[in-house]
Image (cartoon, rainbow, N blue to C red):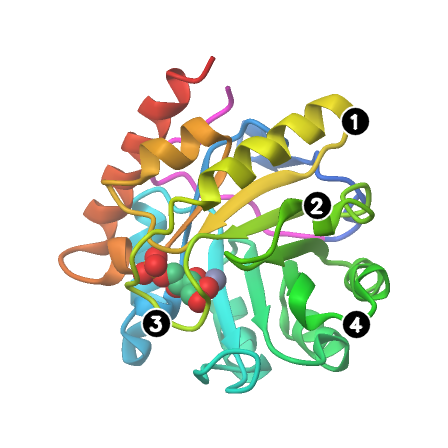
Amino acid sequence: MLELVAGESLPKKRNGRPGTAARVLEFGKESLTRSPGLIELAPSILSADFAHLADQVRAATEGGGTVIHVDIMDGHFVPNITIGPPVVKSLRRATDLPLDCHLMIENPDQYIPDFTEAGADWISVHQEACRHLNRSLHLVRSHGAQAGVVINPATPVETLSEVLDIVDYVLVMSVNPGFGGQKFISGALHKMRKLAEIRAARGYSYRIEVDGGVGLDTVADVVRAGAEIMVAGNAVFGKGDPKVNAAALLEAARSASLQRV
Ligand code: DX5
Ligand code: ZN
């Protein structure tokens, strides 16, 4: 099991990304292979103080966050509105970590070029929002970002059957998207298990990300179910020190990963 040490930073990104989930990133003398099995924490800035975004991202990074999760909402696909490419562009200047843009918007194809231009490294689109899901995922790749597909709590894993060979990661929603601080929906656990089984059976290399209600009370369950990238908003930024919160969450995730069989 590969792990990151809290507080380590990843290198400046991101030219010439290969097209699969396995990547080696050099940083200092260390290297990190972003492949299935690597446990990472992706602090979600949705619950951060937007007036001090750079400071909040820095604190979460010092606590061990290695991916910054950015929730993009349009007020149509989900009942909330957040941010667009200009804020991603500002974040790009504030951190070297990968920016993981979770598009909760209708017609994502229209905006994918703007987000990659702004500096998004990873872009995920919802199965439920894409009329031509294969095309949307290829569009993400063609703009040089890693492509992720997301499923809502009511959407079965089986709906992804025909795209699992072309995605870098699968994001399993464990809340209905739109807001931070909601209660974890445990039905998401069997989907992570299923995704891990399918990956092993078919030899795919996507990583498994989970988003919604991940905290100290749920993180062990999601890791044991197969999640590798833990998105956490409220648990990191809700109260207290994001650095301390992130470190505690990552530690709990690592401990649980050692209990995997
Ligand atoms: C919800 C967003 C999440 C959100 C998770 O629609 O996609 O990324 O920030 O927040 P918590 O971790 O508070 O459930
Ligand atoms: Zn999200």
* Labelled disc at residue 53: 3
Amino acid found under the numbered disc labelled 3: Leu
Residue 157 horizontal/vertical position (percent): 64, 46
Q: Indicate which label's residue lies in the foreground, 1 or 3.
A: 1
Label 2 and label 1: CA atoms lie apart by 14 Å
Q: Nearer the viewer, residue 125 or 240?
A: 125
Asked if the residue at tag 3 contacts the one at tag 4, i.e. Cβ–Cβ closer than 8 Å, the answer is: no
Report helix, strand or loop for mark 2.
Answer: helix
State left or right for residue 29 relative to residue 206.
left
State which region is magenta.
Answer: 1-14
Amino acid found under the numbered disc labelled 1: Arg
Name the dominant secondary structure of the magenta segment.
Answer: loop
Report helix, strand or loop for mark 4.
Answer: loop
Dividing the image into four equal quarters, which quarter contains ligand 1?
Answer: bottom left
Asked if the residue at tag 2 contacts the one at tag 3, i.e. Cβ–Cβ closer than 8 Å, the answer is: no
* Labelled disc at residue 152: none
Earlier in the chain: of badge 1 and badge 3, it is: 3
Residue marked by disc 1:
202
Report helix, strand or loop for mark 1.
Answer: helix
Q: Nearer the viewer, residue 57 or 108?
A: 108
Q: Is residue 5 above or below residue 104?
A: above
Earlier in the chain: of badge 3 and badge 2, it is: 3
* Labelled disc at residue 131: 4
Amino acid found under the numbered disc labelled 2: Glu
